[in-house]
Image (cartoon, rainbow, N blue to C red):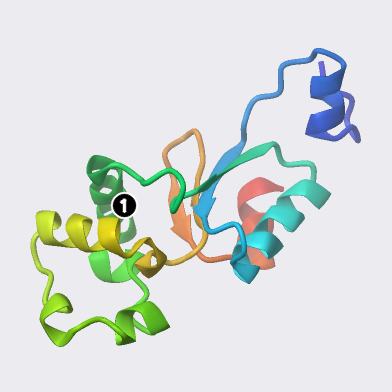
Amino acid sequence: MRHHHESPAAAQGRGVEVKQQATLYGLTKCSTCVKAREWLKSNNVAHGFIDYRDQPVPAETLKAWAGKLGGWEKLVNRASMTWRNLADDRKTAQTDAEWTQLIAEYPALVRRPVTVTPDGEVSVGFSEKRYTERFA
C-alpha cells in the first residue's frame, strides 16, 4: 500500500505496484504538456506520458477520442501554426479516414495534452481547475 504523501515513484521504488491514474498524450517539448505533467507530479497523481510523434496514436483510438470529445473539431487545434500552414485542400477533411490520415501526417494538429483516465474519460488541454476537479 502506498503511504498517503508518498510519491508514486517512491512507492514503486519500494516494490509497490502503483496504478496509473492517467495517461497523457502530447509532445515532450510542448509547454502545456510540461505544465500538466508537473501538476500531476506535484499532486502525486501516477501517470504515463506518450509522445505521439514517437508513438503514433492508432486511427481507432483517435476516432474514439473525437467521439468522446464531440467531434474532430474538438480534437484538432485549428488555431495552430501547423493547421494554418496546411495547404487549403488539406483543410477539408470530413471523414474519419481523412482526419486520421491528416493527423498521422501532422500529429501536432492534436490539441495538447490529451488526458485519458482508466474510466475512459478523455479531455484536451490543461487547466489547474479542471485537473483539480478530476484528480483531487
Vertical placement of 74 versus 36: above or below?
below
Vertical placement of 85 versus 18: above or below?
below
Q: Which residue is drawn at 30% across and 43% down?
A: 61
Measured as percent of width and height from the top left, residue 131 is found at 64, 57
At label 1, counting other C-alpha atoms closer than 10 Å, the crowd grade (few under 14, some 14-19, many 20 or more) is: some
Q: Which residue is drawn at 46% across and 35% down?
A: 119
Q: Mark 1 points at which residue?
A: 68
Give the residue type that dot 1 points to: Lys
Count of numbered labels shown in the rendering: 1
From where the camera sits, is residue 80 visible?
Answer: no
**In-front residue for pair 2/87:** 87
Quarter of the figure with the N terminus: top right
Measured as percent of width and height from the top left, residue 117 is found at 51, 40
Q: In this view, does 80 lie to the left or right of 129?
A: left
State the image quarter where residue 6 is shown: top right
**In-front residue for pair 122/41:** 41
**In-front residue for pair 10/3:** 10
Q: Residue at x 40, y 84 (%)?
A: 81
Mark 1 residue element: helix
State the image quarter where residue 5 is shown: top right
Q: Residue at x 88, y 31 (%)?
A: 4
From where the camera sits, is residue 5 visible?
Answer: yes
Give the farthest residue toward the top: 15
Q: In this view, does 121 lie to the left or right of 64?
A: right
Q: In this view, does 8 lie to the left or right of 36?
A: right
Q: In this view, does 63 lie to the left or right of 12?
A: left
Measured as percent of width and height from the top left, residue 106 is found at 32, 65
Measured as percent of width and height from the top left, residue 15 is found at 81, 12
